[in-house]
Amino acid sequence: MTETTTQTRRAVPEPLIALGLAAGPVVALGFTRFAYALLLPAMRETLGWSYAAAGAMNTANALGYILGAGTAAWWSRRFGARRSFVWGMVLSAVALLASATTGGFVALSLFRFVGGLATAVTFVIGSALASRVHTGGRQARSAVMVGTYMAGVGIGVVLSGIVVPSALTAWGASGWQGGWLLMGLLALLAAGPAAWASRRVPPAPAATAGKERASLRFLTPTFAWYVLFGAGYVSYMTFVIALLHSQGQGTWSTAAFFIVLGAASALATLLVWGRVIGRLRGGLAPAAVSVVVLVGVLPVLLWQGQVAAIVSAVIFGGSFMAGPTAVTVIARRMLPAHAWTSGIALLTVAFSVGQAVGPLISGLMSDSSGGIAKGLWLSVILLAVSAAVALAQRERTHAALPHPDHTAAPAAQPAQGR
């Protein structure tokens, strides 16, 4: 990297770089993972699925996510962080487009699996890139940049909340294919700003000799919390639209719910949680997130109607993406800089395990007597347990945390790609 390029990169405001990176989670979670909840009622009606089959479809996505998260650090080392981040988005877009071409359960499961793998690579590496946007030593400032990156999820939810109902209105029950198609096209467009921003992230510091691997055993409570949190929140996200439909709400009423949820997520993650999490120590941040998300699940279980749905959307939407924000900040604070990508990746594997198990169990419970609401009470239980587990995490600030602006010249970092 030339001196001129370095100066140009540094001249770009940090929030703008983080916002460009946020195009990653727009695709990775906003489209590939969460939009499925909007498409599910039409897909069930057209394809004749049970709730267990619907949950299994998200389990396929989560299994791909586990593989992607587990190999993200390898992809980063092999092809460079920036290149892997962007090409993961492109592959995700291809999986979205392919999902519009078939109604076969096996083929759709395969596309969900591939989409999960690609988006995990994008999300994990993007989280590590976002951790490096701020090159100073201010943890609170770094948390805000991570929060800006995570706000992309809410933006993606809002966009899918507009695109999918529009497709369903235009083409009826078969409009679910149009929904996948439109999101695939938007995902391809999102790769542009993501590529621009990734080139302006400072390079990662080189690992010092003898410190290639960092012990993660002291993060065991956070790992356990992330499994439980993943299972709890994703059960709600998978089936809440189906619950609202069963309560008599129509396509645009549920779309309004989804749009409010996404807007609340983007605003709260951008303006609130980054600052709050940056100041909380130990397991207080993840515990607080679990409690607020739990409260957000309750309104649609205790009451029916649009008001209860909107209240749930505001509280749940305003807090669920604070979980990945908290984990990314904890990894940055408690691990040496060279271990950020691998640490975030392994934590995301734990998250993915929960996301794989949660929808399947919730779907089986929803097929039994008691219906969807019975399955969603599983979310409440898991989130309550996760909050208690998180409190066992103790603070451990890395004593000699290196920052990218204190390390070797960019030319010594070929693994980061171009």
Image (cartoon, grey):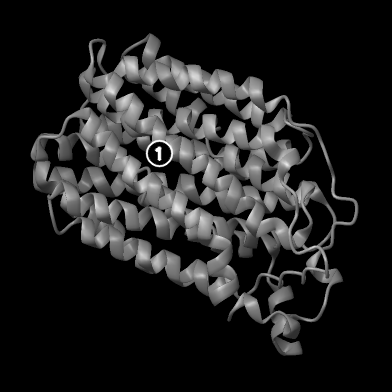
In the image, is residue 219 above or below residue 406? above
Residue 212 in view of the camera: yes
Q: Quadrant of the N terminus?
A: bottom right
Residue 134 in view of the camera: no
Q: Which residue is located at x 34 percent, y 34 percent? A: 238
Q: Position of residue 181 (x, y in %)?
A: 22, 59
Q: Position of residue 358 (x, y in %)?
A: 40, 31
Q: Which residue is located at x 18 percent, y 50 percent? A: 106
Q: Position of residue 161 (x, y in %)?
A: 33, 43
Q: Which residue is located at x 73 percent, y 88 percent? A: 4
Q: Position of residue 43 (x, y in %)?
A: 16, 40
Name the residue tied to disc 1: 356
Q: Amino acid at mark 1?
A: Ala
Extreme residue in the right direction:
399
Say which of 12 and 113 sits in front: 113
Q: Quadrant of the C terminus?
A: bottom right
* Image-quadrant location for residue 99: bottom left
Extreme residue in the front direction:
210
